Structures are given as C-alpha cells and as structure tokens.
Image: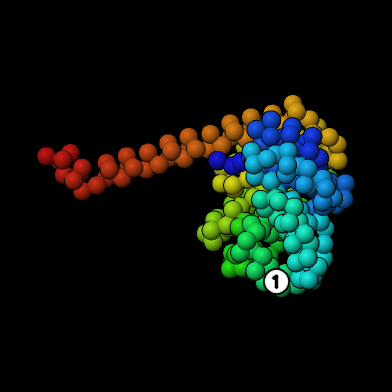
C-alpha cells in the first residue's frame, strides 16, 4: 500500500496534513523551486508540532550537485530534528561524488536521494545510493506545470524504478505534479509513498493546503491501494488453484 506524502510549508499546514491522514509530512517551500528549503525556524516549529505523530522529511533546497555544498546543507537540515533529509540530484556536477560524500552522514541520518524524471534520470544511481547507506530514493519532476511525472516517464519505467529501489532495500517514492487521475495507475506500482502538493491545494502548488483536497486524495489513494491488494490476492489464489489442478497427484486422482 502506498502512503501519502504531503508537502507542507508551515506548522499550520503540517497540522492539517496530520489531521487528514497523511503518512509522512514533507517540509519544503514550493515558491522557492522544485525542492525549495524552508527556514530552519519553520522546520523546527513543524517538527515540534508534529511531535512524532508522523515521520517528517525536509528538503535541502535546489542546490548544485557539488559534494561540499550538499554535505553542509544535509548536516544543517539533519540538526533540526527531521526524520528524513531529501537531497535532489540536479543535472550537472558529480552526482556519484555527492552520494559518496554523504556515506558518513547516512550512518546516523536517514537520507533520501531524489532524481528528476523530466531530466533523463540515471537509474544507475539507485544501487549507488544503497551502497552509500541511503534510506530511500524518489522520482520527482523539476518542472512544475501542466505536465507531470507520467508525462516524463511511462508507467513501465516507473514500475522498474520502484522494483529496482526495493531490490536494493531502499524506500521508493514517486512525485511530480500528481493529481487524482494518476492514483489508480500509480498505486499498483508498489511505491512506498506517492507525493502530492498541487492536488492538495486545489491545483496550485504555491497555494495553501486545502483540508477537503487532502481528505479526497487520501481517500482515493487508500481505495486504489486496497483495490490493488485485492487484485493481487485474487491473482495469487487463481494461480495457486491452477497449479494445484495441474499437479501430477491431481491429474492421477481425476483419472482414477
């Protein structure tokens, strides 16, 4: 079952997200870019308000893939008490070196690497992230507009990404201008989290979180996940019955 990752930019929004059933509260400033970072005092206030009721993640901002710059930002963000620190692997620079320089921090901080589906993401970074001790990896989009995650990559590619992440023991997340219409297609892919912002604000990611939209997305995701589980269970039972009916002992019994 895929959990709901809800992006919040204030303590008030974090409380709304908790109340609406979000599974993880993701702190970022949507007006400051794809992964805009919130001020430290806002992050601290959100962490204090959530008070362990949900895991809290925070982004380090839209930073170039320069190891020293990223490592310093990760250390600052981790010190604010969040459960996960998200690092965008932006185009250019040295992404492998960025992952490598965070090995020590990954021993005591749960790190999540974020690749951009609309910028030719390198899925070869999935095993590298696992090797460096990361807790998870996500796909998102750098561009935020009419197109979204499923415009950048087809569902087969998204499924392969999730499977690859799980094969290496990483949490897998999918985000990028997702809406209600994307949920039925994405929920069966098995991602641990689906991330939303614009759909929780009535369409504009820079608007305020809307309680009604939050509840609607949560209900749709819950329904789709339950349907996926039911379909998978029915398929497994059908396969088991088929295998039993074709086993040698069953065939012999029918012939007797």
- The quarter holding residue 207 reads top right
Can the viewer see residue 205? yes
Residue positioned 58% across, 68% down in the render? 131
| Label total for image | 1
Image: 4 above or below 38: above
Q: Residue at x 65, y 45 (%)?
A: 55
Rendering coords of residue 68 (x, y %)? 78, 71
Q: Quadrant of the C terminus?
A: top left
Residue under circle 1? Answer: 101
- Camera-side residue of 252 and 31: 31
Can you name the residue that lies furthest to the top here?
212
Quadrant containing the N terminus in the rendered view: top right
Q: Crowding near pointer 1: few (<14 within 10 Å), some, many (20+)?
A: some
Task: State the image quarter where residue 201 is shown.
Answer: top right
Residue 225 vs 62, above or below: the answer is above
**In the rendering, at what x and y percent does residue 41 appear?**
83, 48
Q: Which colour scheme appears in the figure?
A: rainbow
The answer to whether one can see residue 178 in this image is no
Left or right of 167? Residue 177 is right
Residue occupying the far left of the picture? 256
**Image spot of residue 118 (x, y percent):** 76, 56
Residue at figure coordinates x 71%, y 62% from the top left = 121
Return the x and y of residue 134 as percentages of the image width and height. 62, 61
Of residue 85 and residue 208, the one placed in the foreground of this image is 85
Residue at x-position 85% and y-position 50%: 39
Q: Which type of secondary structure does the marked residue at label 1 adopt? A: helix
């Amino acid at each position: 079952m895929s959990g709901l990752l809800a992006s919040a930019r204030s303590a008030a929004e974090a409380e709304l997200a908790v109340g609406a059933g979000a599974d993880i509260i993701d702190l970022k400033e949507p007006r400051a870019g794809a992964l805009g970072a919130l001020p430290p005092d806002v992050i601290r206030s959100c962490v204090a308000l959530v008070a362990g009721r949900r895991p809290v993640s925070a982004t380090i901002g839209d930073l170039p893939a320069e190891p020293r710059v990223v490592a310093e930002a990760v250390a600052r963000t981790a010190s604010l008490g969040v459960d996960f620190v998200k690092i965008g692997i932006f185009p250019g620079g040295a992404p492998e070196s960025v992952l490598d320089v965070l090995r020590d921090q990954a021993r005591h901080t749960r790190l999540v690497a974020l690749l951009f589906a609309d910028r030719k993401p390198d899925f070869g970074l999935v095993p590298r992230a696992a090797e460096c001790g990361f807790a998870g990896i996500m796909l998102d989009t750098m561009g935020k507009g009419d197109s979204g995650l499923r415009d950048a990559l087809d569902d087969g590619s998204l499924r392969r990404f999730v499977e690859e992440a799980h094969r290496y023991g990483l949490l897998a997340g999918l985000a990028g201008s997702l809406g209600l219409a994307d949920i039925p297609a994405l929920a069966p892919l098995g991602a641990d989290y689906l991330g939303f912002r614009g759909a929780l604000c009535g369409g504009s990611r820079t608007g305020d979180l809307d309680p009604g939209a939050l509840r609607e997305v949560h209900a749709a995701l819950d329904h789709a996940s339950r349907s996926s589980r039911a379909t998978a269970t029915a398929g497994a039972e059908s396969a088991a019955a088929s295998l039993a009916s074709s086993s040698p002992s069953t065939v012999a019994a029918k012939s007797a």
